Image (cartoon, rainbow, N blue to C red):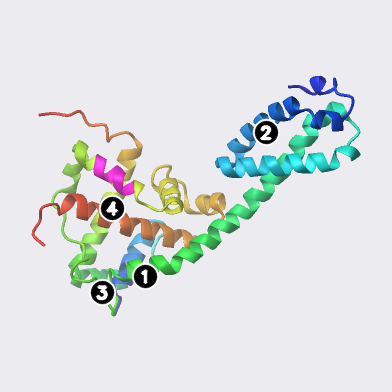
Amino acid sequence: MMSCQQATRLMSESRERPLQLKEKMALKTHLLICAGCRNFDTQISFLRQATRAFAKGKNDIDPTP
Amino acid sequence: MSDQQTASFASAHEALNDPAFIETLRKQMVGFASLQLNDPHLAEDAVQEALIGALKNAGAFGGKAALKTWIFAILKNKIADILRSRSRMIEASSLLREDEEDEDFAALFDAHGHWTREDQPERWDHPEGALQQQQFWRIFEACLERLPPQQARIFMMREFVELETDEICQAVGMTQNNLFVSLHRSRLRLRECLENNWFTEGAQP
């Protein structure tokens, strides 16, 4: 059974390279039973979204009351 | 200063013993080296070594007209040496820190490799909404600044500039696996930083 430490590493790597079928299946199985890792997966996607927005200058927000 | 001006000296040796000449030349060399090396201390060192080399060999140098060209050639070689040894240094130092960092991150997981209770990622409530808030961006920037410099540089190359992994590996001189490890550590750090400083701010422990 895959550990969270292994799962998080694989989730990171999936952002750089396609996962093999057996890796995908092992990860999916782990995510079924692990809320922490499900959150991690969503959150690193958000991290990428935020970083790219930051790079495009979308962090310049007008202050509104 | 052109090579024509250096021709006013009787010999290379004479030119290299003139303080005004050396100072002007040194400034030009430092400017050039700084652009290549991105590090003022390394640039100064490279220039010092190049000038020492030039002074040592001035006797052998006959062509005074090409003096500046010759000195810059010595400087270019010094810079190339530094760049070559630097990519090795980066690898070595990141390897050295690896044990340290593994310990930091090992603390996030228990003996079985599962998230510890305290460090397990929590659910973030509507994270996209944060992108509209100035204060979030301040915290985001602060979290980026907390990354170790080499990690930050690699993370930016991947996530800002959106370079492909092999492009980054070539540019930095690291293996693909080391790149994956570096990006993973950056994400672990940033995620934790954002969770602790924004998403669970004020949440009950």
Determine which residue is flagged by label 4.
A45
Q: Nearer the viewer, mark 1 or mark 2?
A: 2
Tell me which amino acid carries mark 2: Met
Circle 1 — which element?
helix
As measured in the structure, the alpha-carbon distance from the residue carrying label 2 to the one carrying label 4 is: 45 Å
**Residue B103, image quadrant:** bottom left
Q: Which mark is residue B114?
A: 3
Q: Nearer the viewer, residue B76 or B23?
A: B23
- In the displayed structure, A1 sits above or below B56; it is below
Circle 2 — which element?
helix
As measured in the structure, the alpha-carbon distance from the residue carrying label 4 to the one carrying label 3 is: 21 Å
Tell me which amino acid carries mark 3: His
As measured in the structure, the alpha-carbon distance from the residue carrying label 4 to the one carrying label 1 is: 25 Å
Determine which residue is flagged by label 1.
B103
Q: Nearer the viewer, residue A11 or B59?
A: B59
Q: Residue at x 89, y 24 (%)?
A: B10
Q: Residue at x 91, y 33 (%)?
A: B62
* Residue B41, visible in the rendered structure: yes
Determine which residue is flagged by label 2.
B29
Circle 4 — which element?
helix
Q: Nearer the viewer, mark 3 or mark 2?
A: 2
